[in-house]
Amino acid sequence: MDALHQLQNLDKRFSKRTHHSSESGPGWTDKLYHQLVSTLWTPEPTESKEEIDAIKQTEYRKITSLLEESAKTYNNNDALLLLAELNFFSKYGYHRNYKNAFTYYDQLASKGNATAQQMIGFIYATGVGNITKRDQAKALLYHTFAAYGGDTAAEMTLGYRYLLGIGTEEKCEDALYYYKAVAKKVIDYYLSGPPGGHTPPLAKVRLSDENGGVYGYSASMVTERKRRGGYGGGTEKSVSIDEILQYWRYLAQNKHDVDAQLMLGQVYYLGTRSVARNFEEAHNFFYQIVEKGTSGGKISTKNSKPIGQAAGYLGMMYWRGEGVPVSPQAAHKWFSIGVKLQDPIAQNGLGMMYLKGVVVPMNHNKAIEYFKKAADQDNANAQVNLAIEYLQSEANLPLAVRLFTKAADSKHLLAYWYLAQMNDQGVTSRPSCRVAVSYYKAITERGDWLHSTTEDGYDAYMNGDKEGALLYYKLAAERGYEIAQSNVAYMLDTDKQILSTLPFFGSEHKEPKDNEAEQSALIYWSRSANQNNVDSRIKMGDYYYKGIGTPVDYEKAVACYRTAAELQMSPMAMWNLGWMYENGIGVSKDFHLAKRSYDHALNINQDAYLPVKLSLMNMYIKYYWQWITGKEVGESLQIDNHDKRDHPFKADKVKNSNEMQDRKSGWEDADEEMKRQYYKKKQMEREENDHFAEETKDSSYEYEYNEEDELFESVLILALCMFVGWLVYVRQYRMNNQPRNNNNANIANNNHG
């Protein structure tokens, strides 16, 4: 289309003259450098910003007139859709206009266009742009029409709405129908790729993780679990990915470190958000390992594991044609080397060759043998391949289910698919519609190659286009993406400044409330919480407690905190519960339950030591004051020593849960794996250089509760707080007396005069 080419050329022409600001842009030194460069070496533009805008508007008017003429005269629906998307998504730098977009989408929807019907449904569902009021009934109607037209986004939206009963009754069967339709498209595309299927997209980005989570480092359970699992809870947060990559490159190229070469090969092969996939680099590093380990025709026993892994990756690259010409013969050669060294990727690859008769004669028994060896080493692809073979026999059905479940822990799409099918068809021992839907839903969100709205949102966010990012994330949130829901809520959240609620820290000038944004934030926090995001659940409680986007409701706040504490073992939720029990807000005042909650918060998260101890000290003061004044204080606090022993939320239980989660994720995020190995390597270097391994071992003893120690610590903290309070009092006293002394001096001077 001529108009489309003109838009693309116009965007290229003016994109070089414009600059998109970003909230998380370069530091001041970078800005200063670029300013100096632009001042000293960049010639002055021949046109002002106003002139450029005028030229752009003139060109846009010509193009949009051409599109409108094509739509009206020739009934060109593509032109009408392009006009709608120009106005809605601000494509090619066109000024966003929701009202015009709605008009174009409405015209197109009346002609039966499924994409336009889905967009009209989205506008009614969210009220975006304030061009129409929210109407969930109309939203459901338009999404239904769009889904009948085969629109993938509409099918996902309806699946999510029927699953949770949004704008309709909960109907698991209907949710299953729509999610299954999308999952089938995903699996078909996945299997259309090279051997082993298309590589899944990168893991989605949770925006709050960039700032340490919703509540910051150590307080946000979702982010903290990932951070502790990723690199041991280390405190070296300042090390960037570029610095870590440079460190691995130094070891690989200068020290010829095999582990570093393998790490870099895997990172370049899998790709990350920081390091793009580079098959040439990956091949070079893998080949360096194998060449050194197989020189002279003999396989070295030293470093046999990394040599086997490198051979396995090389086999997959030659079979799939990644960075090298497709060559099953070369793949077989590398797989054979890897198998001799017990590499699971090579074992699975050779098993697939025997199963399909590629290069080698077809041999079902040998294929099963290799699949078993690889599956025993937790290779997800082998587990799926072996489970599929076991499905041929009813007697082996339990083994197949067990293998599919293990592979599903590694987020394998085919494992999700078969488990969903088995629950859908009632093959498992306890079939469940909701379990089937959860697996189908996971497939649609994990394998979103063709409808990556979350990626569009992240790209817009990184380019400084907050409105565009919010729009894309809302689209994904309506389709049921939990991570998009939490991102929307986080971007709309007005409750990020904890210190603003405290005296002396609060800002005198407060931004006017945006009730609509606060209500939307609460909606998306709630939807995220209903998909098991514990931080979102606590945020819900905060909103109900503070009356953000809703009237104040302490009972609902307590319910949110209790759910997060009891079912999701959140230390912050336990602390909140303790505070509410201590003060009798939303619940009856109960010092005993308050102390239990505080103790359990500290038991789970040792980083909460200071706030918990301060809270306990404050609570003890209240408790004994009320006891001295003859008020009811409930049972004695001193009999609570059994809490740590009897309470089900034990720290080791949380630790084991986190470790299990880490094992499941595996190489889901190569950035995190590279960080984990980096910190592990640096720790080993420190131990070798400083010889403090014994000290580390001795200092890692398990803390044993001692009431005398606690009392001493509490008294010490109380004394420090009283001292600080006295200093503040003295300072305020002096400041108040200073004007009085000045006035007295002035009076004395006047009298002398």
Image (cartoon, helix red, strand yellow):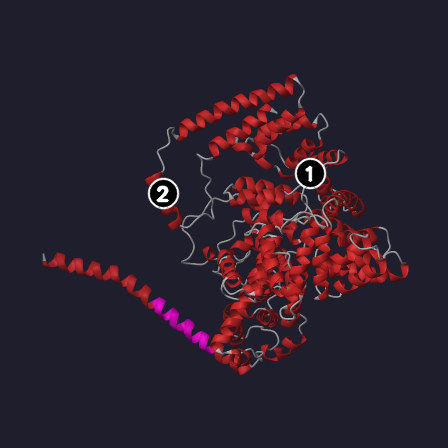
Spot occupied by residue 371 in the image (x, y as percentages of width and height): 78, 61
Name of the residue lying farthest toward the top: 73
Give the amino acid type for the residue marked by disc 1 in the picture.
Gln
Mark 2 lies on a secondary structure that is: helix
Name of the residue lying farthest toward the left: 753
Say which residue label 1 marks.
Answer: 136
In the rendered image, residue 724 lying in the magenta stretch gets the answer yes
Is 643 situated left or right of 747 in this image?
A: right
Q: Which mark's residue is nearer the viewer, 1 or 2? A: 2
Say which residue label 2 marks.
Answer: 37
Is 722 situated left or right of 301 in this image?
A: left
For the stretch drawn in magenta, the main secondary structure is helix
**Residue sitting at 47 percent across and 56 percent down?**
501
**Which region is colored magenta?**
715-729
Q: Residue 576 sits in which quadrant?
A: bottom right
**Residue sitting at 19 percent across and 61 percent down?**
744
Spot occupied by residue 304 in the image (x, y as percentages of width and height): 65, 68
